[in-house]
Amino acid sequence: MGAIASFVRTDPDRARELLLEFADFTRYSFRRHGNYTTLAEELRSVERYLLLEQARFDDRLKVTLRIAPEVLPVTVPFLCIQPLVENAVRHGLEASADKADGVGRLWITARDLDQECVIEVEDDGTGEDPERVRRALAGDTSMDSVGLGNVDARLRNAYGDDYGLVVETARGAGTKVTVRVPKFAPGVHV
């Protein structure tokens, strides 16, 4: 909201555009129907979120999306990608000030892998202590990161224990979170 407020005086048209994106993002986030959505809808929400973050960080956030069109109709748990992207922006970008170019980079890929869709969210931030990540995935309530554990639990509940999050990270090495979902799962539909 701070970025939008700053545009009100300097670029009112941009402020209006961002407010409309924020409204759409909020409507999606607070919708009341269904536990599932399509990957296309989830990515549309992610793009709105990233548009708002890019307004805030200007050219200090570089995002690359590589999405295979054939996986767009795949059913995924509602809000299973956006929290991962939010973590990547926060952790990937907050540390970018220390980097030589001051830029945080984020890659989002979704690809078709036979009977599965594989989604990856990767940043080039400072990375994280793998033990902290393990605790977050285990649902440790003393952690300040409940998003990972929540998404992991919802994926496992929907698709079984073979389909939780896979997190690759180390201090100073960035983070990559991989989500695998079956393209067709009994009882899982929008």
Image: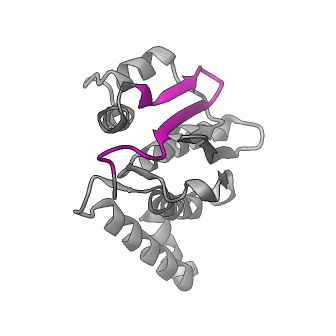
Residue 101 in percent (x, y) is at 77, 43
Residue nearest the observer in this picture, 13 or 158: 158
Is residue 58 shown in magenta?
no
Q: Is residue 171 magenta?
A: yes
Residue 127: where, in percent of width, then height? 58, 27
Left or right of 59? Residue 7 is left
Residue 143 location (% of width, % of height): 32, 25
Extent of the magenta region: 162-188
Instruction: Left or right? Give the position of 69 relative to 102.
Output: left
The residue at 40%/72% (across/down) is 24
In the picture as drawn, the residue positioned furthest to the top comes out as 131
Name which quarter of the figure residue 23 lies in.
bottom left
Residue at position x 38%, y 43% from top?
Answer: 185
| Res 51 → quadrant | bottom right
The residue drawn where x is 62% and y is 30% is 174
From the viewer's side, name the closer residue of 38 and 50: 38
Q: Check the image and name the residue furthest to the right.
A: 100
For image coordinates 52% across by 84% down, the residue present is 12
